[in-house]
Amino acid sequence: MTEREEELGRHATVVRPEADVPVAAGVLFGLGLGGFFDGIVLHQVLQWHHMLSSWYPITSIENLELNTLWDGIFHSATYVFVVLGLFLLWRRARGRHLRWPNRALAGSLLVGWGLFNLVEGLIDHQWLGIHHVNERVEREHWLAWDLGFLAWGLAMLLAGLWLLRRARGGRGPGGSAAAPAALRP
């Protein structure tokens, strides 16, 4: 505790430097929220695809059961991301009164969600082909939906990085653009 913090008292709000912003927690939250959006909206509400629906089309009860099982495993993984993000956030904030820039939280969430879309879109849609974004349209349109999903992910990732940079004031030491501390090697 600094002398100034001691002067202000134990319960005073202390504004910590940007390096204390738990970017990793926001990225994990973003990964989890991206997964929940995909699983709830695309798998369940719109029913555009399921986890393995390109490999095991929903043409039988057995295939539906298999896809539902893997949808549940997928949701479990996204839940783990959210719990880990909460753990990191709790660990960083516990016992301290902090004010973090809203841009840093929004930026880190967008980075995580964008990363989710890019990784899921490249691996599941393109590389493994276990499902595609919208399997209810004609097969020749699947790639367009998949590319739109990737573009959406890239846009969120770039917007998130931009917000994180703005949360730092836009520049690093010497006036150069700098990545957020948690994203630097």
Image (tube, rainbow, N blue to C red):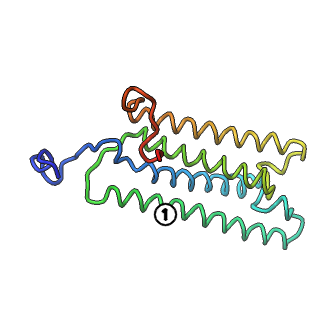
Q: Residue furthest left?
A: 7
Left or right: 141 in relation to 84: right
Residue 47, image x and y in percent?
76, 55
Residue behind mark 1: 83
Is 97 placed above or below 18 here?
below
Near-viewer residue (128 or 70): 128
Picture residue at 77% right of the left edge, 44% below the top: 146
Q: Quadrant of residue 73?
A: bottom right
Residue beneath the point at 57% across and 36% down:
158
Q: Is residue 180 above or below residue 89?
A: above
- Residue density around tag 1, few if under 14, some if 14–19, many if 20 or more, within 10 Å: some
Q: Nearer the viewer, residue 169 or 56?
A: 169
Q: Choose between 111 and 56: the one closer to the eye.
A: 111
In the image, 157: left or right of 70?
left
- Tell me which amino acid carries mark 1: Val
Q: In this image, 92 relative to 135: left or right?
A: left
Q: Give SS at disc 1.
A: helix
